[in-house]
Amino acid sequence: MHEAVASVPPFVALAYLVAGVLFILALRGLSSPATSRTGNRFGMAGMAIAVATTLYTHDIANLPEIIGAIAIGGVIGFITARKIAMTDMPQLVAAFHSLVGLAAVLVGAAAYLNPGAFGILDAATQQIHNASRIELGLGVAIGAITFSGSVIAFLKLNGNMSGKPILLPARHAINLGTLAAILGLIAWYFVLPAPTLTAPWLFWVVIGLSFAIGFLLIIPIGGADMPVVVSMLNSYSGWAAAAMGFTLGNSAMIITGALVGSSGAILSYIMCKAMNRSFISVIAGGFGADAGPAGAGGAVVDRPYKRGSAEDAAFLMKQADSVIIVPGYGMAVSQAQHALREMGDLLKKEGVSVKYAIHPVAGRMPGHMNVLLAEANVPYDEVFELEDINGEFGQADVAFVIGANDVTNPAAKTDKTSPIYGMPILDVANAKSVLFVKRSMGGAGYAGVDNDVFYMDNTMMLLADAKKMVEEIVKGLAH
């Protein structure tokens, strides 16, 4: 792909500007479930304009091959998106992040091997421009970190790797040393007078170390913190794309990458604040994991608890004035959101006030529960974030918890040895009655920590598949 020799038509800058505006509108639309579909359409339109403009402004030697590749990728993406279950959406997002990172590495490698084709070769010295060396180094480094980190995130989310933190000895020293080596090598690559001829290994070592640090940063992070990891990797993928945009001289990539990178970083910061985590420790990796007694938090103790039935739950909620529903990953696994909405509708017909409480990190990625409830057409004005509804549990007659363990666990407030200590929780224990839907008492949450709420006097455990249990409750409410 070569830059066109002719001067760039004036409409090109305007087209990229329009694409950038559409990307901004897309982010604005995605900030609320009510406007998310419109936001997606804005993003699709902006990307279509950006791709078409880029193809127009370049001399494409094999246009049919480029169009064929786009068609193949589009078909694969369309089929995957249609078939993927909502429970697997976090894995899909992690996989997409890995592809963005790998694409940045491949583009950077192509530019390094054939700099003349990318317009980054100094004709006098026959060396890559100094500025382009920094862009290439940072682009491939961030891309490689995004790829390998996203692979680990995918494996943890998909259950192929344990969700518990994997703690390496002296991991902080190893991580800092590796990051320092990457930055040092990029600086060395920049100052060498002829790096392509005298030190070709520098570029490839940077890529290799970056792949390694991506694994090392994500392996120590526990399952309860994976939503923040997904958001963080999203930010990394944006910065990798922006760096490659500078190398390619493509303003659309720079704008898009900067938007994705900055929005992902802001979301990560907001989520860290919501979880009482340090944003700097997120970047360093292993922020949810410390060696020592925290690892013992996953033991499930045989303790007495009160078990109820769907009929008991239906009767209790019918008598209530207010019910707060707390959805979690268990709802996603069983695809119970539609039955849950039907249950809420029946309760409202009985005159019961129904609200939904969403924890910032419920599920496996940011906004996971919001997406599922929106899919089931739950009214947006009934869905509340933690800080807006947490004070209402004390006045609620029933807290109906469906598969949300870690985000309701009082250990986050009381047990300093717990892996989730310091994370704000939904105070379901303050409700007059707690109905807790769980498949069985045999397993703890994703963070591996048992929940004291299960054994409280005002808690009734509803042990069954979440969807089947809610469907049985719906039948009880209908009679």
Image (tube, rainbow, N blue to C red):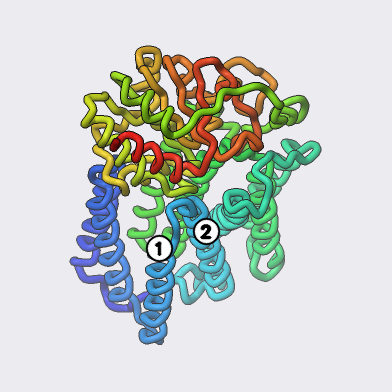
Report the quarter where the N terminus lies: bottom left
Check disc 2: other Cα within 10 Å, few if <14, some if 14-19, many if 20+: some
Image height check: is 96 above or below 121? above
> Which residue is the site of mark 2?
95
Amino acid tagged 2: Ala
Which type of secondary structure does the marked residue at label 2 adopt?
helix
Q: Is residue 141 visible?
A: no
Badge 1 element: helix
At horizontal 71% and vertical 26% (from top left) the residue drawn is 301
Cα gap from disc 1 to disc 2, whole angstroms = 12 Å
Q: Residue furthest front?
A: 479
Which quarter of the figure has residue 370?
A: top left
Residue 301 is at least partly visible in this image: yes
Rendered image quadrant of residue 390:
top left
Which mark identifies residue 321?
none
Q: Position of residue 315 (x, y in %)?
A: 37, 26
Q: Kindly identify which residue carries mark 1.
A: 81
Residue 318 position, x and y percent, is 31, 25
Residues 427 and 334: in front is: 334
Q: x, y percentage for residue 91?
A: 52, 54
Pair 1/2: label in front: 1
Question: Depth check: 390 or 143 in front?
Answer: 390
